[in-house]
Image (spheres, helix red, strand yellow):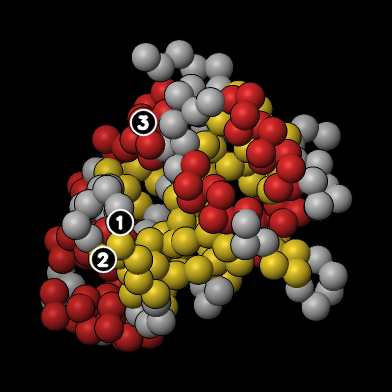
Amino acid sequence: MEEELLYHYTSLEALYAIISNIKPTSENEAYFTLRATHASFLNDLNDGRLLLEALKVIGINENKLWLSLDRTGYPFVLSLSELCDDLNMWRCYADQGRGVAIGLDKPILDEEYHTYSKGKLDICKYVSKGELVDILKEDGSEKIITDNNVLSLDRLIVDKLLVYKDKSFTAEREWRIHVMDTEDKFRVNPNSDLIIPFKELKIPLAALKSITLGPKCEYERNHFSLSRILSKYSQRIRIQKSLVSLT
């Protein structure tokens, strides 16, 4: 049966940190961690705001929205893509093609992340603000809000805040693991002057199926090193080279 994979684009440095810190579990299995970033620190500065703007249009008070966000926690996102070897993804998310795309088994991610308390894997839905307003009216969200149901508003925020994205990002074909939480860690982004909040997500090692080295990432020597690092684990992880031309 053909594999169903989703890809996490990142730097070579980040990949090394990930695979150098694979941990065993009590069940004699293993896992690694990926970082879900606070939504306010993603490349799209409007990420998560589309729903809030649409809710204001249909009549919800802005103060109620902020109170709901305080109750539900901070929004964290791990971005994935259906695209295995895409020029724009290499440029935007993998160190201008010097990074990697980590191929992850979608069914395993589905099984691991299917609840809002732990995190949920969802496909992104690309809409305009006007289209989202219509969706909220059609699915009954407007009635929930006008009934002043606090719990229903909180559930709406948790369920949909990080699922909707602006249509200009459609080409990225994004999926994401999203979670609301009040606990976080911090890191400094070496490419900017930001201290970034993040949350660690445990991923079963069995989900790691492939590593694609970017078009500007040296293949032969990195293939050798990665093979040596991963050789201690019994499962087969494909290491392959990008076929994209990037000069």
Label 2 Cα crowd, 10 Å radius (few <14 / some 14-19 / many 20+): few
Q: Residue 237 in the image: x percent, y percent?
A: 75, 40
Does residue 121 appear in this view?
no
Does residue 211 appear in this view?
yes
Whether label 2 touches label 1, CB < 8 Å: yes
Measure the C-alpha gap from mark 2 to mark 1.
Answer: 6 Å
Determine whether, in the image, residue 62 is placed left or right of residue 149. Answer: left
Q: What label does residue 189 carry, if any?
A: 1
- The type of residue carrying mark 2 is Ile
Q: Earlier in the sequence, mark 2 or mark 3?
A: 3
**Quadrant of res 50:** bottom left
**Quadrant of res 3:** top right
Count of residue discs: 3
Determine whether, in the image, residue 34 is placed left or right of residue 205. Answer: left
Tell me what residue is drawn at x 79 percent, y 46 percent: 231
Q: What label does residue 96 carry, if any?
A: 3
Q: What label does residue 195 carry, if any?
A: 2
Secondary structure under the numbered disc 2 in the rendered image: strand
Q: Residue 98 in the image: x percent, y percent?
A: 44, 31
Tell me what residue is drawn at x 81 percent, y 41 percent: 236
- The type of residue carrying mark 3 is Gln
Label 3 Cα crowd, 10 Å radius (few <14 / some 14-19 / many 20+): some
Label 1 Cα crowd, 10 Å radius (few <14 / some 14-19 / many 20+): few
Q: Residue 128 in the image: x percent, y percent?
A: 24, 43
Residue closer to the observer: 31 or 61 = 31
